[in-house]
Image (spheres, coloured by chain):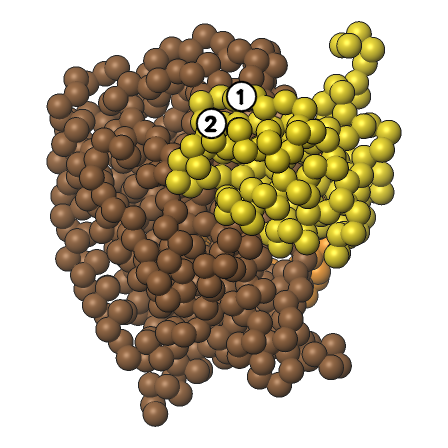
Amino acid sequence: MAKKTIVPIGPYHPLLEEPEFFKLYCDGEIVKDVVWETGYNHRGIEKICESKTFEQVFYVVERICGICSTSHPFAYANAIESIPGVEIPIRAKYIRSIVGELERIHSHLLWMGLAGHFLGYNTVFMWAWKYREPVLDMFEIIAGNRNNYAMFTIGGVRRDIEEEKIKPLQDVLDKLKPKMDLLVGAVMDDPVIHARTKGVGVLTAEDIHDFGAVGPTARASGVDIDIRRDDPYAAYDLVDWKVITMPEGDIFAKAAVRLLEIYESISIIEQCLKGLKKEQEGGIKNKVKTIPPGIGMGRAEAPRGEVFHFVKSDGANRPVRHKIRAPSYTCIPTFRKSVVGGTIADAALATAAVDPCYCCTERMAQAYDYKSGQMIYNAADLVKLSQQKTQVLKNS
Amino acid sequence: MAIEDLKRNVNEKFPEIKEIEEVNKKRLMIFIPRELLHPMAKYLFEDLKYRYVIVTAMDSQDGYEIIYHFSDDTSGWVINLNVLLPHDKPEIESLVPVIKGVEWIEREIFDLIGITFLNHPNLKRFLFAESWKDGEYPFRRKHTEEKK
Amino acid sequence: MSLKEKIFKKSLWLFHLSAGSCNNCDIEILDCLTPRFDVERFGMKLVGSPRHADVILVTGIVTKKTKPRVLEVYNQAAKPVVVVAVGACPCTGGIFAEGYNFAGPLDKVIPVDVYIPGCPPKPEAILAGIVKFLNKK
């Protein structure tokens, strides 16, 4: 459960000064230990789900996280539909995958912007978020809302993507590709970014295994896992795509994995749109009368990794128990490995590289002196340190 | 590992297993006594290299059910270890020595249901504010005699 | 003379506070800074400390752990300050109001001047809400 909030830190987005999530204990420049405290965003969602009907739970889990708003309903749908074993229509599979991949694009672009901000490249922040807007417009056309789409229902989806919506969606994707090339070129070839991110915040495959980390964090350390391929759902086994991995495990690898995944997502959406054109309009839902007693475990690949939902039903119309595991829950403890031993200036960047979901964690870090226990930097300072280091590298 | 091979190996290595059930498509539940948790978790996590997913705790009619979820990413199966603890003695050995990643979830279960994880390196309050009353566990249920 | 002319002689400095949100509203607030909405052309900018703030934007239900922080931030802010509840959560608690960790809604903790409902409210709605309040006579 523990759906925690993150407040991104920095001059463009001020943080909560008081509640510290991370305390970095530092000896001079080096981080010696990380201690964390959490619970600021604990909203009791799993318990709330126990008092909702199975259909109503979709609307609750959507609001666990603002960025991975579709991933939780996706995993929950996989879980709840597995109990009676219902298959959803092919058209619904395509629509679910389209919404899931659009979300991946918007989430990775959002991350790109924040990473740029932490590095001190505020132009990257502005560009990435500007190119994100047409994607949100598409959500508004498909679902009626820029965030919180309410597209999922038991047995299928709630709204169709009609013929007239397919062309505007394709246009958005066509316009996005050259912008992505621009962004990737500006970021990936920059020598200062190389200096700041290569070899920094490294996680080995063994670290990934120890903590159960998932998603781009794991794939950037060479661990080849992706739920869309390993435990296929929706339309992912109907289209061609590849899993992106990088061997180095540093921040640069994590960024590269995310950027390249955007291209894969665009390709998946295009194939799904072609698939939609072949299916007849309508027929987006198979009716499910009741959920029998049983256990369902559903998974989905969110932008940050595997989302896992466990649902137990006893034949009534509400879940007896609903356990939710967001990917950041296992990715964030890896800070212990990637931040400890590094410098304070790299700490803000290393924590951002894992892309802690805003709502799954709180990212308020403060740095303390190891010997005296005195606080020396607050979170805004940590971001400034990171940006200053970039400046120094640029000028040298 | 193919699922039939896994079932066979597990039955051979750990004859004290209570039951193995395929609760759903590609979802296996292995019901074990408390003493088997460490050796079985070691086998799944260290020998077979299954991925640790999360731990679910429930207050069921017969006791507190703690389910440890593992993922076999080569086959897409989720392999689960199910331990039942009696209502009057909700404690179990912490799995942190085997899997570093369970530290947080054990603290969360401690907060929400009140299970004590013995030898946990840092079993403190995790989610709740200091003002939260001790002994209030939101996920504990009242079980009535009629239900039995 | 409107409130704007009376009190806020220069451009507005906003402080954003998340009291336990899903971050949808936080992202929409950040979106206001980005080129499409570009709130900086009105002189509004986000600042890092409540002491410099003219407006406090609060998102999220108030959870038991964030309640003392919310009070502290409010006390630190130099008065007069405008408190804006952004989103359904601080206005009423939304779907989380029945949760066991709910300690709000926001106006039971600190005085609220503007309510902007929505889940999340679009950036246009957020800006419209603030502007409407400022033009109030």
The subunit carrying tag 2 is B
Mark 2 and mark 1 in contact (Cβ < 8 Å)?
no
Cα gap from disc 1 to disc 2, whole angstroms: 15 Å
Amino acid under label 2? Glu
Q: Is residue A263 visible?
A: yes
Q: Quadrant of the N terminus of chain B?
A: top left
**Element on which disc 1 rests:** strand
Image coords of residue C59 (percent x, y): 55, 48
The subunit carrying tag 1 is B
**B130 to A249, vertically: above or below:** above
Amino acid under label 1? Val
- Apparent side of residue A278 relative to residue C75 in the rendered image (left or right): left
Q: Are marks 1 and 2 on the same chain?
A: yes
**Chain rendered orange:** C
Q: Which mark is residue B23?
A: 1
**A179 to B8, vertically: above or below:** below
Image coords of residue C95 (percent x, y): 57, 32
Which comes before the other along the chain, label 1 or label 2? Answer: 2
- Corner quadrant of residue A246: bottom left
Q: Please name whichever residue, A11 or A82, is drawn nearer the observer in this view of the structure.
A: A82
**Chain rendered brown:** A
Image coords of residue B88 (percent x, y): 86, 29
- Mark 2 lies on residue: B4
Q: Residue at x 28, y 18 (%)?
A: A89
Q: Please name whichever residue, C74 or C100, is drawn nearer the observer in this view of the structure.
A: C100
